[in-house]
Amino acid sequence: MKQAIEEATATGTDVIDHDHHGIRQVLQELGIQEINAAYSTGLQWGGESNEQVRSISSPTDGKLIGKVRMATAQDYEQVVTTAQEAFKSWRLVPAPKRGEIVRQIGNKLREYKEPLGKLVSYEMGKILQEGLGEVQEMIDICDFAVGLSRQLHGLTMHSERPAHRMYEQYHPLGLVGIISAFNFPVAVWSWNAMLAAVCGDVSIWKPSEKTPLVAVAVQHIIKDVLAENELPEGIFSVIIGDAEIGGLMAADERVPLVSATGSTRMGKKVGAVVGARLGKALLELGGNNAIILTPHADLDMAIRAVLFGAVGTAGQRCTTTRRLIIHEDVYEDVKQRLLSAYPKLPIGHPLQDGNLVGPLIDTDAVQGFTKALEAVQAEGGTLLTGGQVLSGPGYETGTYVQPALVEAKNEYHTVQEETFAPILYLIKYSGGVENAIELQNGVRQGLSSSIFSLNLRETEAFLSHAGSDCGIANVNIGTSGAEIGGAFGGEKETGGGRESGSDAWRIYMRRQTNTLNFGTQLPLAQGIKFDI
């Protein structure tokens, strides 16, 4: 890491020199004491030709953390060229050896978990425990990928032709483009990059322009591992840019797979461009997630899950609980419990012990929050509590809000849309669980879903073919907090992509069917005769 700090210092523009919450020390530990980076491929830093500089301020206190130069189309070309060269050698490294590199990356992340988690928290705004949890998620996916590196298996099939053998195998795909969002600025990248790496691919990462510094930090950590193993530049690359860079990546035929995380609106654009060139798109888009509470729910457990799901990360998770579908028999009880809990939520600087809710990412997100509340009330919804933009000491940035509870109907236009903020809609249902499931499924998104019930018939109905239509369906746990062992993703306008665990690795490889003839004859399939 000392080498990384010296290299950054040699070409940098100053990061703001302040010790607020020890951030300056964190930056130094992570090798980003000074930055002049639009992109990074291995040990190279570039982008000096571009005069467009973006200032990165923390939503927690408004302080300037640092500045980065935004990449140009010329920078992008250099990144792709370097990655192409790296792929030529990386794909030939045996998969278990590639896994060994990922193991070392995981160990480096363990070494820097605390400062990296702190930077995630400060740059993005999630509380420190969530920042540390995000780094742990990176470590976990590294562990998963190491084991996976010895299990990239195909199948063998019996041939209908004598003296023939059939099997299938998987080969590295090539360059994988990764477009990540601000809310999980490093974890979702790692889901893609670590699996791609053990599959023999190289990756090009365009982080959110709102949270680029933590991506630079991760690149510093990784490039130490690459250098120690005398590996080529470009196995892992970072390019910092705006939507133009993402557009170049989506349209680039040299990038066979583009994995994009973000809004449904963004995903539709990326998917259309990638699809037009017949490339592969892995899309992880919006969620409008619901928890169903039946009369048989353990409400003590349920309320805890609802609170974390609705206000964790200030409502800025794709798996955030946005709708609470409550049976009429328990509706008033649940409402009163939430009305008691919401005003007590500790809201403030995410690096301060005891706070559970940090800021929204910026004032644009705050505007989206307030506009959604105005819109849903105009439709007939009732604001029960919260909804204020907080001001005064500790809230000078205008990015802190009081999470809101709203009584609403599922069919309201505002409820049908995803608002990336802490708004929880309370929706009453009557009758059997099938009515609740119909409400749960009655939105265009299909990411995460949950039911709380101790009734076996209700929970099995929720998990059946006629149950939840989401990619994730949970019983007696909330909508947030997926583990890396399962495939993560959703249906409908969520995009249909799957990342992380299970067999999600297959999308990062190309499948090939092989037939071997070890006999002396040349029989054709289906018994066709073609004798000359």
Image: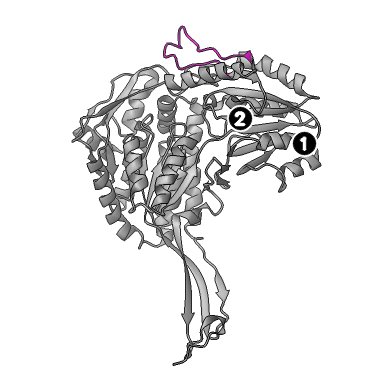
Q: Residue furthest top?
A: 392
Magenta range is 384-403
Tag 2 and tag 1, C-beta contact below 8 Å? no
**Amino acid bearing label 1:** Val
x and y, in percent, of residue 426 in the image: 67, 23
With respect to residue 481, does 333 lie above or below? above
Residue that badge 2 annotates: 321
**Amino acid bearing label 2:** Thr
> Are there few (<14), some (14-19), or many (20+) residues within 10 Å of tag 1?
many
Q: Quadrant of the C terminus?
A: bottom left
x and y, in percent, of residue 84 in the image: 29, 54
Q: Is 93 in the magenta?
A: no
Residue 109, image quadrant = top left
Q: Does 13 sit left or right of 108 as displayed?
A: left
Is tag 2's residue or tag 1's residue first in the polypeptide sequence? Answer: 2
Q: Residue at the spot x=43%, y=45% of the render?
A: 272
94 or 345, nearer to the observer: 345
> Are there few (<14), some (14-19), or many (20+) residues within 10 Å of tag 2?
many
419 or 129, nearer to the observer: 419
Residue 345, image quadrant = top right
Q: Does 326 sit left or right of 82 as displayed?
A: right
421 or 413, nearer to the observer: 413
